């Protein structure tokens, strides 16, 4: 929708702030990734300044409202069940667009670092294997969980929302925090309707993350 990434700003936990302006998105992202490392890996980002019309035309509507609705639904499921695991199952069965894939334990985690000379947008790739009810689920991840494969069969891919929930707390786990031995519930939510538009699909095609579906299905 023609919205520029800059001017943008990066702020760390101690309040240090860096502003970038007059740059292309690719160069700004490369600089931001370097700065994020120097800032300790945890930062707040503000960018893509836009007016109300641009936000309405280019944004994904109702995201915060939907997140709040899901949180309330899960809390209601928790009140109606005896355990967190039962609450997750109840929540998935009573929530439109939510698929409960399986419950199990993480048995392997492997991260492949991004090449040093890679450009902006190239990230480390992670693979997690979850043993759930006698079968093995494979999750491919970068910053988010991007692909879900059930023993060679593709179950979900971005922009569908793939979640690994802590089986003991129900809290969603970050991809970089997943470790072998974790008990997890694997859940998938449908993608927001805006991502089904042909112009939007090109922006989130899985090939843009460096994956090819045939090779994954054959592996």
Image: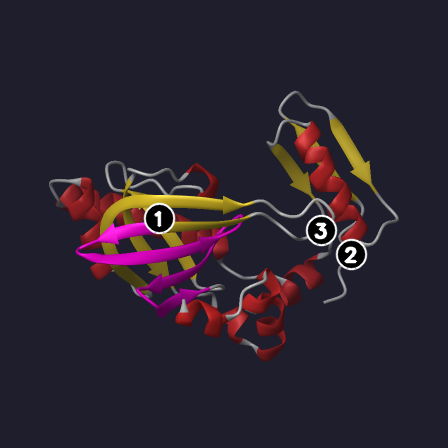
Splitting the image into 4 quarters, where does residue 44 fall? top right
What is the crowding at mark 3: few (fewer than 14 residues within 10 Å), some, or many (at least 20)?
Answer: few
Circle number at residue 4: 2
Disc 2 to disc 1, how far (Cα)? 33 Å
Callouts 2 and 3 close, C-beta under 8 Å: no
Most foreground residue, 172 or 210: 210
Residue 155 is a magenta residue: yes
Return the residue at label 3. Answer: 118
| Comes first in the chain, label 1 or label 3 | 3
Judged from the image, the secondary structure of the residue bearing numbered disc 1 is: strand
Disc 1 to disc 3, how far (Cα)? 28 Å
What is the crowding at mark 2: few (fewer than 14 residues within 10 Å), some, or many (at least 20)?
Answer: some
Q: Tell me the residue at 24%/56% (across/down).
A: 102
Return the residue at label 1. Answer: 164
Q: Residue furthest left?
A: 82
Residue 144 is a magenta residue: yes
Image: magenta residue range: 129-157
Is 74 left, or right, of 141 in this rendering? left
């Amino acid at each position: 929708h023609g919205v520029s990434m800059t001017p943008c700003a990066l702020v760390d936990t101690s309040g240090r702030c860096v502003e970038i302006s007059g740059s292309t998105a690719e160069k700004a992202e490369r600089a931001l990734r370097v700065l994020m490392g120097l800032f300790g890996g945890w930062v707040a980002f503000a960018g893509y300044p836009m007016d109300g019309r641009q936000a309405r035309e280019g944004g994904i509507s109702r995201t915060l409202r939907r997140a709040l609705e899901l949180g309330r639904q899960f809390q209601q499921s928790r009140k109606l069940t005896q355990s967190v695991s039962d609450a997750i199952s109840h929540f998935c069965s009573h929530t439109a667009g939510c698929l409960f894939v399986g419950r199990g334990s993480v048995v392997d985690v492997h991260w492949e670092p991004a090449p040093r000379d890679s450009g902006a947008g190239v990230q480390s790739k992670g693979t997690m294997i979850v043993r759930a009810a006698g079968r093995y689920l494979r999750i491919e991840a970068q910053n988010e969980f991007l692909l879900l494969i059930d023993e060679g069969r593709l179950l979900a891919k971005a922009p569908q929302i793939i979640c690994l929930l802590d089986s003991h707390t129900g809290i969603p786990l970050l991809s970089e925090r997943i470790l072998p031995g974790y008990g997890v519930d694997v859940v998938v939510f449908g993608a927001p309707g805006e991502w089904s538009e042909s112009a939007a699909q090109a922006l989130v095609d899985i090939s843009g993350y460096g994956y090819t579906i045939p090779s994954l299905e054959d592996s």
